[in-house]
Image (spheres, rainbow, N blue to C red):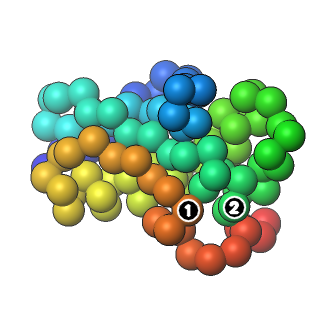
């Protein structure tokens, strides 16, 4: 399975409190997203931060987040991915 991620800027979706970052799986665009809660719980973003902080957190940790998404894409044979806090080890990431 060939999995790549678009270099496009991620997009915040207030309807479901996620930041989206699509993947290209075997030539097909597949939606991937991470919950704002996961960004807050594991990547140091505070609840009172504005949308830009959530997107900045995803950009800063993109390799790690994409690695987790890539594994889920493999396991589910390319189904859409929604990463939540439980997909990451407990606690905040320490730099």
Q: Nearer the viewer, residue 14 or 3?
A: 14
- Relative to residue 87, is residue 4 drawn left or right? left
- Image point (13%, 52%), residue name: 77
Residue 41: mark: 2
Distance from the alpha carbon under mark 2 to that under mark 1? 7 Å
Front residue of this view, candidates 37 and 26: 37
Query: Where is residue 68 shown, x and y percent of the image?
Result: 42, 59
Q: Residue at x 86, y 40 (%)?
A: 48
- Give coordinates of residue 54: x percent, y percent: 70, 38
Q: Determine whether the residue tagged by mark 1 lies in a helix, strand or loop.
A: helix
Q: In this view, which residue lies farthest toward the bottom? A: 90
Q: Confirm or deny contact between disc 2 and disc 1 (CB under 8 A).
A: yes
Counting from the top left corner in percent of width and height, residue 29 is at 24, 27
Within 10 Å of disc 1 (Cα), the crowding (few <14, some 14-19, many 20+) is: some
User: What residue would you read off at disc 1?
Assistant: 85
Position of the C terminus, as image quadrant, is bottom right
Question: Left or right: where does residue 36 sit relative to residue 51?
Answer: left
Residue positioned 63% across, 52% down in the render: 37
Residue 16 seen in render: yes
Q: Residues within 10 Å of mark 2 (few under 14, many from 20)?
A: many
Q: Disc 2 or 1, which lies upstream in sequence?
A: 2
Q: Is residue 10 visible?
A: no
Task: Give the answer, above or below, for where 88 lies relative to 12.
Answer: below
Identify the secondary structure beneath mark 2. helix
Q: What residue is drawn where x is 31% and y is 61%?
A: 71
Is 42 on the left or on the right of 88, as rendered? right
Q: Position of residue 27 (x, y in %)?
A: 16, 29
Q: Vertical placement of 85 versus 90: above or below?
A: above
């Amino acid at each position: 399975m060939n999995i790549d991620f678009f270099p496009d800027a991620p997009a915040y979706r207030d309807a479901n409190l996620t930041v989206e970052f699509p993947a290209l799986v075997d030539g097909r665009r597949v939606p991937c997203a991470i919950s704002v809660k996961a960004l807050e719980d594991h990547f140091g973003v505070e609840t009172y931060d504005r949308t830009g902080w959530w997107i900045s957190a995803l950009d800063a940790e993109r390799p790690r987040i994409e690695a987790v998404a890539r594994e889920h894409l493999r396991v589910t044979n390319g189904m859409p991915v929604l990463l939540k806090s439980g997909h990451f080890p407990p606690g905040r990431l320490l730099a």
